């Protein structure tokens, strides 16, 4: 289980594959011009969070987003393969997401990394990331956001918009629910998600 410590999460900026609604998994697709601009907006939000360290997926779209966010902060950025997007296998580059509901339900889907295995990988990466100096910003992927929600007991999974900072707050009391708040003057208004 995750340590009961607050942290921040940022999905990478937009790529051309995001724009085309293609599954990109482990393909190292770079940010497009809009993604770079989104990361600049996230940089302005991150500047006011008092961050002390950044944990980042080893894929270039997340690394580039983190580099932009970190431009004025100059923080240590630690890279984690365990925070990479899930392997979508034969669906790489496809727009066919017909199998995702079965995958989210931990059903067998031939080819992609299983949601259970992916959650365990994300759990290990997040636990490692949360040993860094706090507050920590994790810069990763939409699938990592889904995995974190399920690990924290969320029944319904919410989509993470590109380059919108989310704050994860642990339960205030034993048996309580984690809370996720989307932050800032970004295209998506601030909102809260609770388990």
Image (cartoon, rainbow, N blue to C red):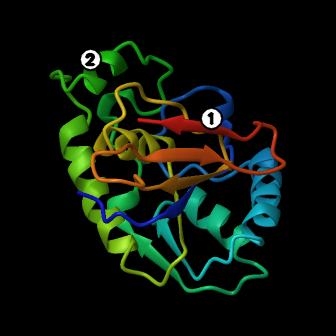
Query: To which quarter of the image does residue 36 belong?
Result: bottom right
The x and y percentages for residue 67 are: 67, 72
CA gap, disc 2 and disc 1: 22 Å
The residue carrying mark 1 is 18
Q: Identify the residue shown where x is 36% and y is 79%.
A: 131
**For the residues carrying marks 2 and 1, which lies nearer the camera in this image?**
2
Q: Residue farthest to the left?
A: 108
Q: Which residue is mark 2?
A: 102
Residue in view at x 63 percent, y 77 percent: 51
Residue 119 as seen in the image, left or right of residue 180: left
- Measuring from the top left, give residue 188's x and y in whole percent: 75, 36
* Left or right of residue 44, residue 170 in this image: left
Left or right, 151 with respect to 130, comes to left
Q: Residue furthest front?
A: 173
Who's the residue at 82% across and 56% down the image? Answer: 41
Dot 1: element: helix
* Quarter of the figure that contains the N terminus: bottom left
């Amino acid at each position: 289980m995750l340590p009961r410590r607050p942290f921040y999460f940022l999905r990478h900026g937009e790529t051309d594959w995001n724009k085309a609604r293609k599954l990109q998994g482990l393909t190292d697709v770079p940010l497009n011009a809009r993604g770079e601009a989104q990361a600049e907006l996230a940089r302005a939000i991150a500047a006011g969070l008092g961050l002390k360290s950044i944990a980042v997926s080893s894929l270039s779209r997340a690394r580039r987003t983190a580099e932009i966010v970190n431009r004025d902060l100059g923080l240590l950025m630690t890279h984690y393969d365990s925070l990479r997007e899930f392997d979508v296998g034969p669906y790489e580059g496809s727009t066919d997401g017909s199998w995702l509901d079965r995958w989210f339900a931990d059903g067998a889907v031939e080819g992609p990394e299983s949601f259970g295995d992916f959650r365990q990988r994300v759990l290990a990466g997040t636990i490692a990331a949360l040993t860094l100096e706090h507050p920590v910003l994790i810069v990763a992927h939409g699938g990592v956001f889904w995995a974190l929600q399920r690990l924290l007991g969320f029944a319904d999974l919410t989509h993470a918009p590109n380059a919108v900072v989310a704050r994860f707050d642990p339960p205030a009391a034993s048996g309580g629910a984690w809370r996720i708040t989307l932050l800032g003057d970004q295209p998506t208004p601030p909102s809260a998600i609770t388990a």
